[in-house]
Amino acid sequence: MAKYSFLLILYGTFSTVLFGLSLFTSASRAYDYFTLIHELTGSFHLTLLVNFVVFCFILWGLVSTKLLFGDLRIIETEHLVDQLPFYGLSLLFILFNDDNVLLSMFWGGTTILLKSYHIINQDRLEHLQLMTVNNLHNINSPSLIFRTFASSIFMFYLLVSIVIDVFMAKLLVFDVFQGVSSIGSLLYGIQFAVMATDSFAYLWKVGLNVYELMFYRCVPHPDASVRTPTQQSVPTDGAEHSGSGDEDLFDDDNDDDETEQVWENKPLYTQTLEILSSVIKSVFYLIFSYMLYVHSNLPPPISMIQGGIVSMLQVVQKTKRLAAFLSQAKSLDKQLEDATVEDLNAADYMCIICRDNMHSPEAYEARRHKPLIPRRRPKKLRCGHILHMGCLKDWLERSSVCPLCRKNVFALEASTPPQPQGTAQVPQETNPPNHGMHPTRTFPSGVPIPTSEATNVSVHGTNGNQSTNNMFTGRVPSGWTAFPITRTGPDRFTIRVSPTQSGTLIIRENTGDAQLYTLGTN
């Protein structure tokens, strides 16, 4: 951070000194105010002036962001870095279409500043919603949730930004400053109108989320001291045989069934709202393109064509995604099978999305004496990853692929036959097997490893006892990668992953089985 601050100070000093010299030179040659303006906006002096204006906008953006939002979080900085460069590049096309460079620079800088405010403010509102959801166990009144959002300064910023965007769009579209011949002002007005549409749509999404929190998620939790005996976590014979790994997950008596009361129809409304927002933006671009081409006999600028095409593509993509979500949600429980105890044990009983514990329905019912709610049932995808049913539904609102391996959740590959549960596909060998090959050894994760002649190697555990394990070597299947490994100690190995990078492996005692853990890269 100190490096970037130093570069900013250096750039600011350089820009200010050059502009000061340019202003002094122009003032020494000018006879009056109009001559001074002519000197400043001509040839090389205009470049120095534009550079100084850019520095002023950067400085004002940093100061205003610090005053309005304080220190930025990492995710907010990442969103700014991801979205602002492409947005600024699209504004450059508007800058090149206008002869008044200074006025276009002013509107461009103002547009980028307001866009950055929108990005940061939406991240802050999402953080507020997340904190409210995590604190639901301390909230017992829907009115408290409403007051939390109504009194938030970020909600006030959102309302103010909508008013400012509408006002700026109206001001620039009517082209107060330069008359009907200013295409640049019109294009910046469209950008403000698009930002107003996005802000208004986000306001409605926040309203839907608040409605869900107030009337679905905010339910009184029963006190643990007044629970009935059937609600207590009493060990039973059926639970003792459900798997040792699953029993440890029931040590906590807190039952989160109430926190899974959600508004099932909310995805339908939110995605419909996103489609309407994209339709409105498409209509904006089409109307103004028609006005320029038909009434003004001017070709639509590249930025307007690009915005219209992107908006229409968003309409098509979001409509397809909504249709796919509706069709998949109806038969989601039938298309995907529940994860077994062996599958959960291999996945460490952890959901790949929420990172929360998962329970097998049989073990949960044996422990809690009530069925596991549908949203907490563990579902196994066709790729083998396991997650909660509720997490899967929430993920399908955004994408139809696995969040880890990016494989389609429902579509099956035509060349891949159905595999038995817990079995991975092994590449078939075309050559006859060697006589010295041993049978394939399958580890608990379900991944078979082709083996050849076994070699006995002494491996020392952390307790000093020496044990003998078999290390297998053989032909590397397609899709796998072989790395050279070197023994550097009694319980340490070094694996070379590249000519310049290597990793260290160590064997530790873990419930009687020796396992390898990665310590770090060298």
Image (cartoon, rainbow, N blue to C red):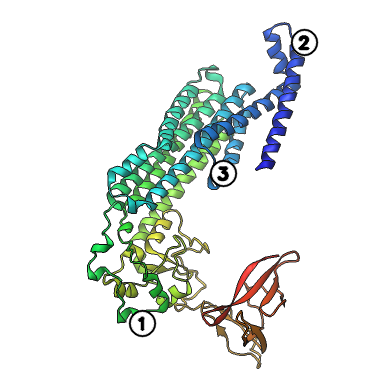
Name the image quarter holding residue 513.
Answer: bottom right
Name the image quarter holding residue 183.
Answer: top right
Q: Is residue 371 above or below residue 63?
A: below
Measure the C-alpha gap from mark 1 to mark 3. 50 Å
The type of residue carrying mark 1 is His
The type of residue carrying mark 3 is Thr
Name the image quarter holding residue 375.
Answer: bottom left
Front one among 406 and 26: 26
Measure the C-alpha gap from mark 1 to mark 2. 95 Å
Mark 1 vs mark 3: in front:
1
Q: Earlier in the sequence, mark 3 or mark 2?
A: 2
Percent of width and height locating residue 16: 71, 25
Measure the C-alpha gap from mark 3 to mark 2. 45 Å
Residue designated by label 2: 29
Rendered-image quadrant of the N terminus: top right
Residue designated by label 3: 77
Q: Is residue 388 above or below residue 116?
A: below
Mark 1 lies on a secondary structure that is loop
Q: Is residue 357 above or below residue 259?
A: below
Residue designated by label 1: 241
